[in-house]
Image (spheres, rainbow, N blue to C red):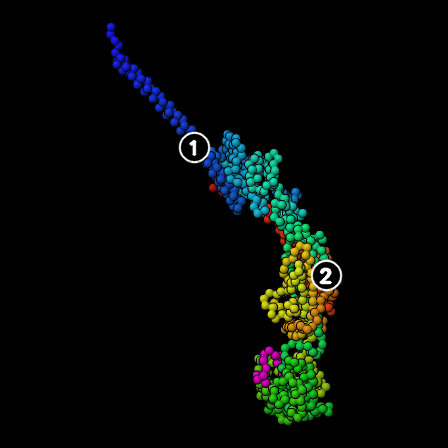
């Protein structure tokens, strides 16, 4: 019996095993390849889907950019998308959006969007944002044009109409679109001008996304939802303090609950519920110039209101001056009139000199040594027949030459310079006339005014020459036929240059106080030249370059006290300004107080003479309290005209007019401002709404 060959059997079994193994390997590889191919196809499909989504989102961004260009100035622009995209684009007008102030004033539009829809996914451009809708819900790809920052609601409503295509033109309807100023006129009209609340309502089938976005953008507790409508409601606690009457600095004098007026003090207290408020205060004269004025019509200048005067008498000493008129020697009459002239001058600042002429000329020194002197007793002694002769011929020009020399030697341009020329005869020849005119021209060049006087029989002197000399220098020609007439002429000339009818600005001031602090008037620039009393500036100085003002702040609940004062003046001076009484034609020289008398009386104006007027008053109330306007004061009707509306005061809510009655009919009107006015408290900034009405046209009408 033969044993089986195990080795051969073993080889046969290995061969079978290898065949099976190879077959299995091929199968595994095939399956793996197939799996890899299937996986690769899935990945490629996912990549294609992602790429398609990204392309679509990019195109929606292009849509956003195109509408942005229309919103910011381009009234029409071109928008192109892929054909496959445009086939799924559509304009959808569902829902609405509105903004409302105080539940009464509202702007609204239909809510429109451009949408791209595929199975299971929608991309939509709505109110400037891009929304993505899937089975998982609503997501926001890019935020909409609704924002809340620093208490301001910012919203751009893009109202879209028309039909989409691969090539579109976006056309803005300029007439129906509304910018922020136009929407402000609707939202903040009438009772809505002081907003208490603001509501933004959006009704959309993307309400889930809108709700989440609003909750992130707006303060907690402001967002509510009812179905597809999302409401954002902002009350005063969410808005800036300027909208809260109890916290802002708006003052309304038409609202008696805002303030308390105490006539007896007088004082004004601002009373609002939030006593932490601080209000700026400003008070200025109601008009240009001050009005605490009176007139002084005294003929003799007993007060020092003007610059010093130098006068040189140029007296005729020719032989004919020894002749008599009506029993009085001409020379004696001339000297008497000259002494009368000096009686009108002021020894504290005026001076006189004397020169004489015949065919020659001479100085007659006052007291034997002064060309010009304010020692009037010595001047009167010089004007005596022992010093003034009457002999020789007549050379007027020589007398004028001596007068010019006096001024060259002793005077200056800080003083008014005059000459008083008297003659009773003609120059000895025509050459002297020519030389007289030359001397007059020299006087005019040096601001010396010459008054000329012809004395006696006019046929004996050259009246034409005397008139010309006076005219050249800005003086006047006079004549007299006897002693009394000559004295009247000299007196009139003296009064015209040495005395003044004056409009007097008496020194006065005011002081305002609040919270234990006192505030005086201020003027811009240096105030060193302005008179003051106890550091309170004189508010009645007509030479200040700008009106005085009060500027400070006051606290809620603290009274603002108003006090006025008037003073006595120690030193007066002319301002150079002249007022003319149109009824009489008289000139009045405007004066100022250069120094208040520190030892004089400070008179406080009591409360009954200080009046406060608000918009509830008529202009007649102001006029009645302050009395009639004098001719030298600014007319009250003119002063109040800018604030007059059909007979009633037309003031801003925070303005009042303060009238102060000083003594003797003098008064002052001032404009008082406390806090901010209702008119300037512009709250439109808390809502910024723009509405763009845009039509999507199927083709580019410009041929693009």
> In the rendered image, which residue does mark 2 sit on?
265
**In the image, residue 377 lies at what x, y percent?**
67, 87
The crowd level at tag 2 (other Cα within 10 Å; few <14, some 14-19, many 20+) is: some
Residue 47: numbered disc? 1
Which range is magenta? 406-421
| Residues at discs 2 and 1 in contact (Cβ within 8 Å) | no
The crowd level at tag 1 (other Cα within 10 Å; few <14, some 14-19, many 20+) is: few
- N-terminal-most mark, 2 or 1: 1
**In the image, residue 89 lies at what x, y percent?**
51, 34
Q: CA distance from mark 2 to mark 1?
A: 87 Å
Question: Magenta span has 412?
Answer: yes
Answer yes or no: is residue 134 visible: yes
**In the image, residue 490 lies at what x, y percent?**
68, 83
Residue 210: numbered disc? none
Residue 347 found in image quarter: bottom right
Relative to 65, residue 373 above or below: below
**In the image, residue 211 lies at what x, y percent?**
57, 37
Residue 480 found in image quarter: bottom right
Question: Magenta span has 487?
Answer: no
Secondary element at image label 1: helix
Q: In the current view of this chain or complex, which residue is farthest to the left? A: 2
Frontmost residue, 396 versus 503: 503
Relative to 289, residue 26 above or below: above
Residue at 29% in and 17% down: 14
Residue at 63% in and 70% down: 530
Residue at 69% in and 72% down: 600
Residue at 63% in and 53% down: 680
On-image quarter of the N terminus:
top left
Frontmost residue, 570 versus 79: 570
Frontmost residue, 156 versus 267: 267
Answer yes or no: is residue 644 visible: no
């Amino acid at each position: 019996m033969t044993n089986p060959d195990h080795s051969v059997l073993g080889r046969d079994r290995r061969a079978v095993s290898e065949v099976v193994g190879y077959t299995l390997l091929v199968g595994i590889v095939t399956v793996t390849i197939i799996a890899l191919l299937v996986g690769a196809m899935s990945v490629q499909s996912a990549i294609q889907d992602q790429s398609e989504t990204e392309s679509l989102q990019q195109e929606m961004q292009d849509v956003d950019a195109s509408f942005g260009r229309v919103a910011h100035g381009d009234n029409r622009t071109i928008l192109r998308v892929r054909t496959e995209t445009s086939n799924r684009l559509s304009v959808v007008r569902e829902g609405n959006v509105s903004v409302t102030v105080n539940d009464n004033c509202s702007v609204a539009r239909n809510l429109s969007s451009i949408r791209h829809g595929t199975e299971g996914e929608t991309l939509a451009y709505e109110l400037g944002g891009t929304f993505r809708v899937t089975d998982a819900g609503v997501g926001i790809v890019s935020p909409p044009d609704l924002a809340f920052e620093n208490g301001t609601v910012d919203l751009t409503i893009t109202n879209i109409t028309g039909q989409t295509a691969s090539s579109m033109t976006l056309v803005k309807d300029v007439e129906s679109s509304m910018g922020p100023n136009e929407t402000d006129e609707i939202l903040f009209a009438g009772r809505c001008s002081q907003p208490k609340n603001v509501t933004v309502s959006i009704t959309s089938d993307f309400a889930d996304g809108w709700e989440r976005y609003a909750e992130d953008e707006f303060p907690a507790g402001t967002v509510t939802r009812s179905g597809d409508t999302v409401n954002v409601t902002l009350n005063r606690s969410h808005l800036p303090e300027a909208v809260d009457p109890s916290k802002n600095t708006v003052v309304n004098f038409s609202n008696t609950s805002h303030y308390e007026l105490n006539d007896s003090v007088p004082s004004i207290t601002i009373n609002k519920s939030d006593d932490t408020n601080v209000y700026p205060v400003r008070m200025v004269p109601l008009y240009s110039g001050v009005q605490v004025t009176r007139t002084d019509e005294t003929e003799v200048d007993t007060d020092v209101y003007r610059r010093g005067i130098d006068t040189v008498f140029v007296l005729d000493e020719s032989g004919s001056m020894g002749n008599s008129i009506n029993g009085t020697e001409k020379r004696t009459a001339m000297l008497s009139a000259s002494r009368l002239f000096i009686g009108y001058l002021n020894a504290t600042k005026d001076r006189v000199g004397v020169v004489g002429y015949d065919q020659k000329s001479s100085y007659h020194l006052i007291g034997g040594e002064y060309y010009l002197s304010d020692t009037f007793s010595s001047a009167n002694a010089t004007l005596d027949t022992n010093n003034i002769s009457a002999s020789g011929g007549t050379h007027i020009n020589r007398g004028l030459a001596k007068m010019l020399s006096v001024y060259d030697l002793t005077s200056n341009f800080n003083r008014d310079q005059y000459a008083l020329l008297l003659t009773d005869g003609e120059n000895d020849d025509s050459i002297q006339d020519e030389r007289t005119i030359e001397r007059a021209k020299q006087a005019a060049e040096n601001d010396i005014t010459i008054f000329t006087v012809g004395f006696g029989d006019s046929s004996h002197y050259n009246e034409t020459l005397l008139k010309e000399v006076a005219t050249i220098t800005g003086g006047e020609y006079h004549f007299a036929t006897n002693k009394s007439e000559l004295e009247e002429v000299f007196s009139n000339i003296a009064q015209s240059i040495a005395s003044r009818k004056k409009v007097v600005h008496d020194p006065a001031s005011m002081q305002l106080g609040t919270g234990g602090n006192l505030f005086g008037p201020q003027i811009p620039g240096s105030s060193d030249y302005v008179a003051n009393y106890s550091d309170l500036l004189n508010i009645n100085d007509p030479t200040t370059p700008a009106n005085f003002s009060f500027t400070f702040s006051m606290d809620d609940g603290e009274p603002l006290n108003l006090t006025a004062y008037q003073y006595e003046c120690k030193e007066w001076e002319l301002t150079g300004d002249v007022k003319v009484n149109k009824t009489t034609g008289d000139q009045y020289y405007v004066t100022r107080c250069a120094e208040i008398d520190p030892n004089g009386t400070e008179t406080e104006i009591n409360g009954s003479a200080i009046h406060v007027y608000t918009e509830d008053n008529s202009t007649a109330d102001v006029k009645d309290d302050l009395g009639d306007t004098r001719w030298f004061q600014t007319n009250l009707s003119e002063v109040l005209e800018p604030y007059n509306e059909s007979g009633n005061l037309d003031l801003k809510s925070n303005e009042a007019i303060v009238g102060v009655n000083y003594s003797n009919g003098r008064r002052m009107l001032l404009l008082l401002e406390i806090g901010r006015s209702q008119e300037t408290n512009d709250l439109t900034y808390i809502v910024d709404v723009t509405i763009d009405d845009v039509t999507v046209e199927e083709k580019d009408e410009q041929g693009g």
